[in-house]
């Protein structure tokens, strides 16, 4: 059972007029001029409410630029004075937390590398006791919902109620146009588990390529996410980190204007039609489950017959024929090839397990 979260509504501590709420700024704070020029341009964009910049940059190799450190916090203080934008930085240790609090940082974010470590989460959470400061919690590198929810729940149990989840994509070793595969089903499941939890999408890290940011941001908005975290730099081509995924403030403004923000709810007639279609899907889902249950009953019978006749479980020729025929049939019906393959593989895995259970069952 999913434990309840005690979440303070985001609009009580971060007012914004309408979606998308935008958090933006450079991947890394590099120079005082770079931070200031980027922030001044962003402050002119109404959707941008929070300025972000990496101060401490955890890098895979120590020879890479790892951030300017504490001195960059003073640059951010000046940004806040000049623009009125709220500030957010990534923290990975109690020392980072203390430095950020001393420099009037408004929101802290927990990065993908830190979320996976419950020891770090506990230490950061304890360092925040007595401080009513919001947290943005990014998903872990690996596609593991339980790790993500575990960090959220741990912070909540430590008394942190102002929280936002950030979807930044997942490491994925298959070929993909994305730097980090979006795997939308994972943030969707988290949103279903915690409907009061705001969700931002980070298309910069998902894409790794500025050309893909707009369609990815549009997808996030279509899924009713609260807002976007997008990396901007006044001169992206000169950025010391992640230059390919950063855009200029002018490009951000143009992109935001091109987003289509659809209504979350419609007219009574729309709702009536939608409920009718959803009811039809509910009935189809029930039929689908019934068919799968009947299929598995036949599978068990086959398993018993194989056991009686000392026949091996896996019949490769039969399986290859099933795959070929079912894929062709699915494509003829308009189904996506990869979807049919994933569905058949899931059914096949359960089929093998059912037959193994029969084989191992004592008579």
Image (cartoon, grey):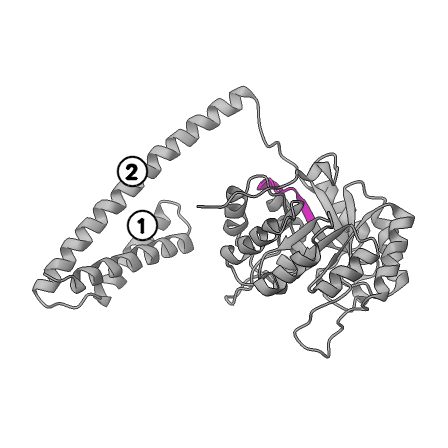
- Check disc 1 and report its element: helix, strand or loop: helix
The answer to whether residue 130 is above or below residue 141 is above
Q: Is residue 38 left or right of residue 122?
A: right
Give neighbour class at mark 1: few <14, some 14-19, many 20+ (Cα, 10 Å): some
Q: Which picture quadrant has residue 310? A: bottom left
Which labelled disc corresponds to residue 287?
2
Q: Which picture quadrant has residue 312? A: bottom left
- Check disc 2 and report its element: helix, strand or loop: helix
Instruction: Farthest residue to the bottom: give it.
Output: 63
Q: Which picture quadrant has residue 353? A: bottom left
Q: Is residue 330 left or right of residue 52?
A: left
Looking at marks 1 and 2 on the same chain, the residue that comes earlier in the sequence is marked by 2
Q: Residue at x 17, y 60 (%)?
A: 358
* Of 200 and 315, the residue lying toward us: 200
**Magenta span covers which residues?**
221-228
* Of 146 and 207, the residue lying toward us: 146
């Amino acid at each position: 059972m999913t434990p309840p979260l005690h979440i303070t509504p985001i609009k009580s501590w971060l007012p914004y007029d309408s979606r998308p709420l935008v958090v933006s700024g450079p991947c890394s704070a590099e120079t005082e001029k770079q931070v200031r020029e980027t922030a001044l341009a962003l402050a002119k964009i109404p959707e941008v409410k929070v300025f972000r910049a990496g101060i401490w940059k955890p890098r895979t190799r120590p020879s890479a630029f790892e951030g300017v450190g504490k001195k960059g916090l003073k640059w951010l203080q000046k940004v806040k004075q000049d623009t009125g934008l709220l500030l957010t930085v990534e923290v990975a240790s109690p020392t980072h937390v203390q430095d950020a609090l001393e420099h009037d940082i408004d929101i802290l974010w927990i990065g993908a590398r830190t979320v996976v470590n419950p020891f770090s989460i506990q230490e950061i959470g304890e360092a925040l006791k007595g401080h009513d400061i919001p947290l943005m919690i990014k998903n872990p590198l690996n596609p593991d919902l339980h790790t993500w929810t575990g960090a959220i729940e741990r912070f909540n149990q430590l008394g942190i109620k102002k929280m936002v989840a950030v979807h930044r994509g997942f490491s994925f070793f298959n070929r993909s146009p994305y730097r980090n595969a979006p795997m939308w089903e994972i943030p969707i499941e988290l949103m279903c588990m915690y409907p009061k939890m705001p969700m931002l999408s980070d298309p910069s890290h998902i894409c790794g390529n500025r050309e893909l940011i707009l369609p990815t941001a549009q997808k996030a908005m279509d899924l009713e996410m609260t807002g976007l975290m997008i990396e901007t730099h006044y001169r992206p081509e000169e950025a010391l980190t992640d230059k390919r995924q950063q855009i200029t403030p002018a490009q951000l403004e143009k992109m935001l204007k091109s987003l289509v923000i659809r209504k979350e709810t419609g007219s009574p007639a729309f709702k009536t039609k939608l409920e009718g279609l959803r009811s039809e899907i509910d009935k189809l889902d029930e039929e689908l489950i019934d068919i799968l249950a009947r299929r598995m009953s036949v599978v068990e019978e086959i398993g018993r017959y194989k056991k009686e006749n000392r026949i091996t479980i896996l019949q490769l020729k039969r399986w290859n024929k099933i795959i070929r025929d079912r894929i062709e049939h699915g494509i003829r019906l308009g189904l996506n090839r990869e979807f049919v393959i994933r569905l058949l593989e899931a059914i096949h895995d359960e089929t093998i397990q059912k037959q193994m259970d029969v084989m191992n069952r004592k008579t």
